[in-house]
Amino acid sequence: MVVSESDAKFMFCPLLKTSDDKMKMCQVDRCMMWCWTDDTKQEGYCGLAGRPGASK
């Protein structure tokens, strides 16, 4: 799912958890898995699930 940076900041990351197992929010461009969809860096996606719209 392609989303804006500001929207991604309010989504939970399945890999980030606190010491008491609560999920943390997406780190967007501070994460190695974050991929931008264009050079303007307005929208992107989490690379954990693969490229959006790519078939298997």
Image (tube, helix red, strand yellow):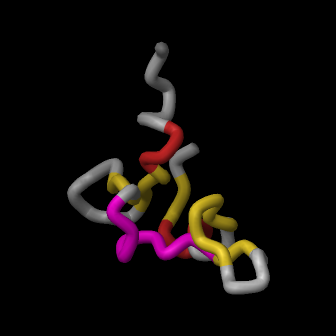
Is residue 29 a member of the stretch shown in magenta? yes
Relative to residue 28, is residue 52 depicted above or below? above
The residue at 39%/59% (across/down) is 34
Looking at the picture, tell me which residue is in the foreground, 12 or 39.
Answer: 12
Residue 27 is situated, as x and y percent measured from the top left of the image, at 49, 75
The residue at 77%/77% (across/down) is 22
The residue most toward the bottom is 19
Answer with left or right where residue 32 lies relative to residue 56.
left
The residue most toward the left is 39
The residue most toward the top is 56
The residue at 66%/75% (across/down) is 17
Relative to residue 1, is residue 26 depicted above or below? below
Please tell me in which quadrant of the rendered image residue 50 appears. top left
Looking at the picture, tell me which residue is in the foreground, 56 or 23.
Answer: 23
Relative to residue 48, is residue 31 depicted above or below? below
Q: Which residues are magenta?
A: 25-32
Residue 21 is situated, as x and y percent measured from the top left of the image, at 76, 75
| Quadrant occupied by the N terminus | top right
Looking at the picture, tell me which residue is in the foreground, 9 or 13.
Answer: 13
Residue 26 is situated, as x and y percent measured from the top left of the image, at 56, 71
The residue at 64%/59% (across/down) is 14
Please tell me in which quadrant of the rendered image residue 29 appears. bottom left
